[in-house]
């Protein structure tokens, strides 16, 4: 099995070096425009796959539900024969070139998959999908490997050092940019959640204010309704208390006076409720004024007796 080689690299022609710098600048500018993780990965595959003459490419990330598995996130020029299975594809970390690249946190390359007995289980998928060679590079950021970027080639391909350097640079940029995009996405999701929660709190506050206002309006209406019978009770008790014919006994007179006091106290209480309701509804304004504390105490004592 062919792993990432580190032979003595020959100096690159100036034109090739200039081309690599142009590719690096183009990819860097493109990455800066991407704001969502999936957009970053798709952009990387779309830009880099034709530049390295790969037939197709893929990005596998750890499955959030099981980090021992890698889930296909996106692909570029994936063969149509197996495209319908994209959403179901899973690779166990440590198995196959992509799984090995993630497990070992190092590039994994295969010059000819059919020349590697250790990759016999990949021969049928390679024939079906039409690739012979591949290179898989781990997506590493701050020591964490989140997945792998893999390029597939139709013919046998011996990777040169400048190709490894370019692909490693692209992968490092991709991992850092994707991490930034993931962070931005999480912040956006947090902001959206906070906005939803604030909207819910505001709606609840409006409901509470509406309920309070309705309660106050109810008290106001009840107070108005109580005034009419209280006025009648007070009028009748006052006429009884006058007793011009002198027909009331002492006990009856005391009862009438008690009715009159209770009705008067109720009338004042209803008046206070009306005033309070008016204030709560914003229909009246409180005007502070000095009060005689002794007189207040006497009135309170009298109403309690």
Image (spheres, grey):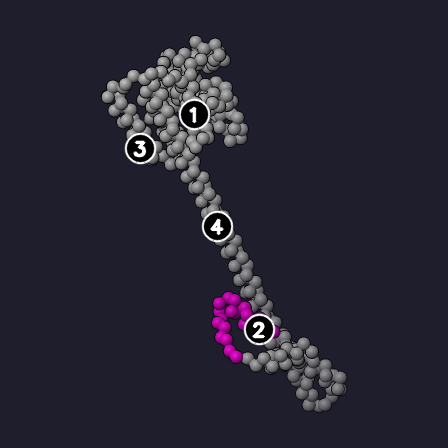
Residue indicated by mark 3: 29
Judging from the image, what secondary structure is the residue with disc 2 in?
helix
Query: For the residue labelled by badge 3, is the local secondary structure a helix, a strand or a loop?
Result: helix
Residue under circle 2? 272
- Does 30 sit above or below residue 282? above
Q: Disc 1 versus disc 3: distance between alpha carbons?
A: 22 Å
Crowdedness near tag 3: few (<14), some (14–19) or many (≥20) residues, C-alpha within 10 Å: few
Question: Can see residue 21?
Answer: yes
Tag 4 residue: 198
- Secondary structure of the residue carrying tag 4 is helix
Judged left or right of residue 305, residue 32 is left
Q: Is residue 278 above or below residue 79?
A: below
Q: Earlier in the sequence, mark 3 or mark 4?
A: 3
Mark found first going from the N terminus, 1 or 3: 3
Q: Which residues are magenta?
A: 269-290
Q: Quickly name the residue at label 1.
A: 138
């Amino acid at each position: 099995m062919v792993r990432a080689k580190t032979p003595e690299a020959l100096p690159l022609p100036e034109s090739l070096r200039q081309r690599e710098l142009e590719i690096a600048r183009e990819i860097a500018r493109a990455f800066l425009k991407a704001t969502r993780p999936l957009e970053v990965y798709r952009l990387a595959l779309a830009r880099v796959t034709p530049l390295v003459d790969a037939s197709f490419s893929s990005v596998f990330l750890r499955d959030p539900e099981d980090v021992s598995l890698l889930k296909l996130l996106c692909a570029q020029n994936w063969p149509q024969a197996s495209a319908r299975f994209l959403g179901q594809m899973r690779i166990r970390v440590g198995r196959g070139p992509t799984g090995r690249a993630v497990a070992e946190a190092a590039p994994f390359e295969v010059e000819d998959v059919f020349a590697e007995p250790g990759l016999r289980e990949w021969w049928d998928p390679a024939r079906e999908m039409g690739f012979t060679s591949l290179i898989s590079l781990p997506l590493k950021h701050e020591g964490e490997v989140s997945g792998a970027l893999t390029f597939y080639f139709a013919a046998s391909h011996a990777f040169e050092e400048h190709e490894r350097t370019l692909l490693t640079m692209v992968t490092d940029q991709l991992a850092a940019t994707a991490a930034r995009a993931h962070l931005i996405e999480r912040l956006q999701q947090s902001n959206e959640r906070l906005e939803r929660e604030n909207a819910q709190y505001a709606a609840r506050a409006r409901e509470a204010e509406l309920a309070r206002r309705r309660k106050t309006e109810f008290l106001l209406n009840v107070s108005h309704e109580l005034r009419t019978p209280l006025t009648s009770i007070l009028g009748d008790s006052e006429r009884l208390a006058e007793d011009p014919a002198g027909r009331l006994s002492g006990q009856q007179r005391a009862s009438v006076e008690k009715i009159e006091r209770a009705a008067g106290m109720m009338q004042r209480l209803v008046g206070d409720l009306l005033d309070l309701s008016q204030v709560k509804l914003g229909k009246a304004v409180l005007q502070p004024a000095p009060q005689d504390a002794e007189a207040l105490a006497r009135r309170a004592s009298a109403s309690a007796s």
